[in-house]
Amino acid sequence: MSKIQICISKCSVRICEKSTNRTVDICPYGIFFYNDNGTILKKEPHVSLQNLCNNLRHVINPILSTIVENVIEINDKSSIKRIDINDPTSRILGLTVMLDHFIEMIAGANYFQPIDTSIFKTKRSEKIVDLLVKYFNIYSILKSEERADNLELNLQLDQGITISYSTDIIEYLISILMDNVWKHSLSGSIVSISHTSKEDNFIDLIFKNTSKPIPHSIDIFEQGMKHGSKKGFGYGLYWAKVLIEFYNNRNKTYEIPDEYKLELEHSQKEFNDTQACQIFRLKNINVK
């Protein structure tokens, strides 16, 4: 048995142990290693930020899974699919989902979905209404003076609409937009979500929330942008654009027409100097 000095002991791949003596290679988690007579050594004293982030995900994801398993053991009615903000165990699950998404963001879009494009068309399906309620509740858990409070969710869409294609990425985009709603809404206002249907089982999902007006010169999808005095790194909406680009590049394999490429558009309707309606349109979601 080889001695591993650079990774966690419960790696499920363990390609390094099967390497040939006196060879240098890189494992699926981005770690360069050297086989020195059965002892696996790191080849370089430093690793790239990408490799560091990928290994962060490699280590933390099992921890998050353990948290979920233990919470469900405490309360077998808890589920990450439905978050009850009045239940402490459910709130823990919601926070765990948030951490998982932040780690995905750090690791990079190329590691969000499998590299093999043949399994990109996931078989998992979810009702859009369930996802909207889930992430509205999850992001209501975070409390700070710079986040909205007491928002009301108004859903104006068919209860039966189900995502039928690349569910994971659409779910991730919904979570980003819900986080944005709680960051940039006026407390006590209404968040309205509706849809418009298109041909060939495609819809546009439309988010509307009331906030302070955003200056027209600001590009809200710009990397690292902050609005006003809000804290944080401002990568959320930029990250949504990264995921959409990733989604559309993968779809080239399936020759989906350009008019059905996934898009995220923003517009603003100003009411006065203190209030404006922010409109986000997630276009061309494949549903059934």
Image: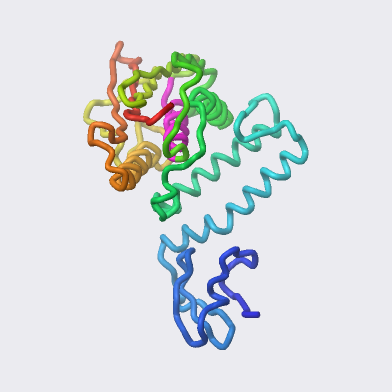
Provide residue 243's location: percent of width, then percent of height.
37, 43
Residue 107 visible to an observer of this rendering: yes
Provide residue 282's location: percent of width, then percent of height.
35, 28
Q: Is residue 172 magenta?
A: yes
Above or below for 23 versus 119: below
Provide residue 29's location: percent of width, then percent of height.
49, 63
Above or below for 269 versus 229: above
Residue 223 visible to an observer of this rendering: no
Q: Residue at x 59, y 84 (%)?
A: 38
Report how many numbered discs are placed on residues in the image: 0
Q: Quadrant of residue 273?
A: top left
Tell me where the magenta segment starts and ends, as one range. Answer: 169-185
Q: Residue furthest top?
A: 271
Above or below for 276 versus 62: above
Q: Residue at x 60, y 32 (%)?
A: 81
Q: Residue at x 35, y 32 (%)?
A: 227
Pick whichever, 96 or 212, lies toward us: 96
Q: Is residue 99 magenta?
A: no
Pick whichever, 208 or 2, lies toward us: 2
Above or below for 43 versus 62: below
Chosen colour scheme: rainbow
Pick whichever, 246 or 225, lies toward us: 246
* Chief secondary structure of the magenta portion: helix
Provide residue 41's location: percent of width, then percent of height.
53, 79
Q: Residue furthest right?
A: 74
Quarter holding the C terminus is: top left
Q: Residue at x 31, y 42 (%)?
A: 248
Q: Is residue 232 left or right of residue 85?
A: left
